[in-house]
Image (tube, rainbow, N blue to C red):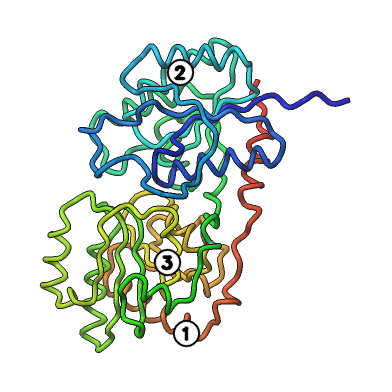
Amino acid sequence: MSAEPKNIVLIGPVYPYRGGIAHYTTLLAKTFAKQNQPVKVISFRRQYPAWLYPGESDRDPSQNPLQVEAEYLLDPLYPWTWWATAQKIAAIQPSLVIIQWWTTFWALAFAALAFLLRRQKVPVLFIIHNVMPHEARPWDKWLARLALKQAQRFLVMTEREQERLLSLLPQAQTIKLPHPVYDMFAGQKIPQAQARKNLGLEPDGPVLLFFGIIRPYKGLRVALEALGKLRQHGQKVSLLVAGEFWEPVSEYTRLAQDLGVLEQIKINNRYIPDEEIGQYFSAADLFIAPYVGGTQSGAVKMALGFGLPAVVSRAVFSKELENYPASRISWVEAGNAQALAEAIAQGLEAAKQTPAQIIGEPATDEWEKLAAEIKSIRIV
């Protein structure tokens, strides 16, 4: 008789914390459970001090959130919680501890935790969402190296982040597995006309969707410039911007006014709760992700989960999305508003010619494959 599988411990944000990494942690935990892999989720008593968080709140306002059972043990500012968590984990002797890595704010806590676990012969894997913060500071490289050098293995999602990790830790042992499609909200899809009515959009005319936290690297300025270029050529396209701004909204509305496209833009400046996500993706004809930097994108994966065709920047996504057909993904050079305008026009025309039902369904086994690959990792 084969032995029962040992626990995997998964450390990261989950509900009531919000955002793509919380969703990722939750979906991975749920997938382990579906595969009969015992998993213990450890999350945070506090994720950030309120005065340090650039948004309104790091809490998820969803009425029907995506959630999983977890213990909330870690605090980034209280070292005794790091030690107590390490002791609790070591006591169950898991086969693997997985730590989500996305910000150097947690570097000291995760460095201490991983170090303490390794001393207890507990293997540690970091899942790298981005090696360095999107708006990096001079000390971030030192903090990232301090924490990441404590792990024996790393899971990276893009070739770009693999290169960044190896530039920081040349001997790092990496596994590259792409970010799975976020199809957990695809059941919320509703008729486009109804979605537009619910959101106060005009019933006719093409609608683009720009979704997620608004930060400089995501290229919303480029999107507005592309909208202006389309207008110059007689193409009136609406842009739905849904997500919390982490910089002044006035900077964007002023640019839109200067470009003559302000009346074509609808902005919903807030974190979109889980139960409302389907309306935004149902209302749009085309998703745009004109990133000028950054790493992988949960929002792009959500668009793919809804079967919504997307125009995306080669600066970030090309290697990881190259297997998707042209009916689902169009490529554009990062930072080039003219190229983006042309890609939007072509993408909208293609969307009219391609019925939604044959765009293609998301690969629903991507989470299962990810979990299976992680379970197969052996660290001596």
Between 166 and 186, the one lying in front of the other is: 186
- Pinpoint residue 133: horizontal percent, then vertical percent: 32, 39
Q: Quadrant of residue 69?
A: top right
Of discs 2 and 3, which sits in the foreground? 3
Rendered residue at 63%/16% (across/down): 93
- Pinpoint residue 310: horizontal percent, then vertical percent: 44, 68
Q: Name the secondary structure under disc 2.
A: helix
Q: Quadrant of residue 255?
A: bottom left
Between the residue at mark 2 and the residue at mark 1, the CA separation in whole angstroms equals 52 Å
Question: Going from the N terminus, do you reach mark 2 or mark 3 first?
Answer: 2
Rendered residue at 27%/84% (across/down): 236
According to the picture, the residue beneath numbered tag 1 turns out to be: 352
Q: Are marks 2 and 1 in contact (CB under 8 Å)?
A: no
Q: Quadrant of the N terminus?
A: top right
Between the residue at mark 3 and the residue at mark 1, the CA separation in whole angstroms equals 20 Å
Dot 2, how many residues are within 10 Å of its Cα: few (below 14), some (14-19), or many (20+)? many
According to the picture, the residue beneath numbered tag 2 turns out to be: 113
According to the picture, the residue beneath numbered tag 3 turns out to be: 279
- Pinpoint residue 240: horizontal percent, then vertical percent: 31, 69
Q: Is residue 202 above or below residue 297?
A: below
As shown in the figure, which amino acid type bears the numbered disc 2? Leu
